[in-house]
């Protein structure tokens, strides 16, 4: 089964257009990833690296 890739609409400066459905989904995933990156568990992990 091939995964269908859709072209994400971008603004003039090349960033993802957050007004589209796909753009909002991408923005939500990025916000979640940013939040996870700075979680207490990860901060403690970085402390002992």
Image (cartoon, helix red, strand yellow):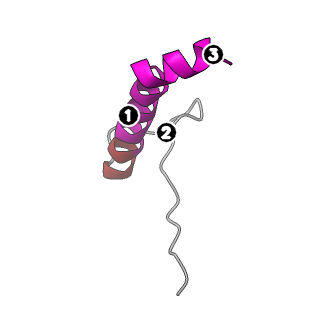
Instruction: Tell me the residue that label 1 is attached to.
Output: 32
Judge whether 48 appears above or below 14 on screen. above
Q: Which quarter of the picture shows residue 19?
A: top left
Helix, strand or loop at disc 1?
helix
**In the picture provided, is 24 more to the left or to the right than 46?**
left
Query: What numbered label is drawn on residue 16?
Result: 2
> Badges 1 and 2: C-beta atoms under 8 Å apart?
no
Which dot, 2 or 3, sits closer to the camera? 3
> Earlier along the polypeptide chain: callout 1 or callout 2?
2
Residue count near mark 1 (Cα–Cα under 10 Å), binned few <14, some 14–19, many ≥20: few
* Quadrant housing the C terminus: top right
Q: Residue 23, can we see it?
A: yes
Query: What numbered label is drawn on residue 48?
Result: 3
The residues tagged by marks 2 and 3 sit, at their Cα atoms, a distance apart of 36 Å
Q: Is residue 47 magenta?
A: yes
| Magenta residues, start to end | 26-49
Query: What numbered label is drawn on residue 6?
Result: none
> Where residue 14 sits in the image (x, y, percent)?
59, 35
């Amino acid at each position: 089964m091939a995964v269908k890739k859709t072209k994400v609409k971008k603004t003039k400066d090349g960033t993802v257009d957050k007004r589209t459905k796909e753009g909002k989904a991408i923005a939500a995933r990025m916000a979640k990833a940013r939040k996870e990156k700075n979680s207490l568990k990860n901060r403690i992990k970085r402390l002992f690296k």
